[in-house]
Image (cartoon, rainbow, N blue to C red):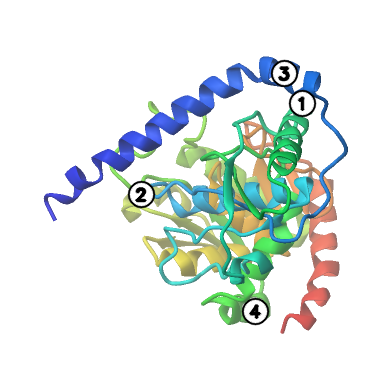
Amino acid sequence: MALRPFRTIPLRFRLRARRFQNKIQKRLQPRYWARASARGIGPAPVRHPGDILTVPLHPYAFVGHQVSGWMAGYLWARDLEVEYVGSKIPGDPDGLFAFSAGAGSVEARKRVIVRLPATEDERTATSLDILRSHVNRARKKRPGKAIEFRLPLDHPRFDQVPASDALRSAVMAGSLGRELQRLEASPDYVAVHVRRSARENDIGPDTHPDRWLDIDWYAELIGRIRAVDDLGQVPIRVYSLGPPESFAALSALAGVELHLNGDRDQDFVELSAARLLVAAPSSFSFNAALVSRGAVLARAPWWHHIPDEGRWVRMNAAGLFSETSVKRAIDVSLELRPRDAEER
């Protein structure tokens, strides 16, 4: 076991090199665009039988990061009209997410590999056109051949909400799909995710001030949630990692239960099943919010899009939110729940 870190050094070096390369390509995106537009972008790609798109997932990232990478590939494939064959989630050995692979993945055939360049996310207008130009050019150069298009490592996607149905379907088909159904049919509760370190020096007030929210911040937020008429008596569950004494200010509040250091996958489905989920600045609880059919309260801005409509409510850095918006989100979530009867 002691030799294991040394064995991973070559892979870790390659991952850092890819990230550096991606960073340079993004800086040069205006030049990429100038060259691509000079060649002519051509029409939007049409789905070509046999072509697939894949995405590498960071093997050492947390599962939330890896799932976000899968969803980014899913959405870029949809825009590019290419069959998506998502990678296996390295951090999901027990099959919490049963992503269905594209039809091309079951067809054993030789494909030409074409690596797509790194671009900014979809908010930059030229990103999609640059990727389209590479897809079109590769098909012109290799007529009649099946192609595997590969996105770069950690290719960004800001708005991942459109992938929520695919993510929910993956959880429903996974190892805890029935457990999620059971929890959603159980008595209501509010789930609050408090992001804390899962590894040494993973996150802290000094290293990640943009992601670290202290316990007093959460205590004040819970007080504001309690003031919402529909939530005054609903039990509140706090999910996190660490010793109970670190959360004493929360456990002292009436109706608050601590759920600490639990099974990761079970915590995920319990977050997803809540009547109201308070998502932390964390891919883990953000993904749970995408899977959920309940109301979601999330702090914005963040590195992914946080909607402020339907069952989603934004709160600001101070944890302030509109009570009217929370009531709207709860009403919308109650309308969505009956749709899931077909899933059961």
* Residue of label 3: 35
Mark 1: give few (<14), some (14-19) or many (20+) Cα within 10 Å. Answer: many
Q: Nearer the viewer, mark 3 or mark 2?
A: 3
Q: Point out the tag, 2 or 4, that comes first from the N-terminus.
A: 4
Q: CA distance from mark 3 to mark 1?
A: 12 Å
Q: Residue at x 52, y 29 (%)?
A: 210
Q: Earlier in the sequence, mark 1 or mark 4?
A: 1
Closer to the N terminus: mark 3 or mark 1?
3
Task: Select label 2 or label 1 by which is in front.
Answer: 1
Between 297 and 161, the one nearer to me in the picture: 161
Tell me the quarter of the image containing the C terminus. bottom right
Question: What kind of residue is marked 1?
Answer: Thr
Instruction: Determine which residue is flagged by label 2.
Output: 198
Can residue 252 be seen by looking at this rendering? no
Q: What residue would you read off at disc 4? A: 181
Compare marks 3 and 2 and give the one earlier in the sequence: 3
| Residue under label 1 | 126
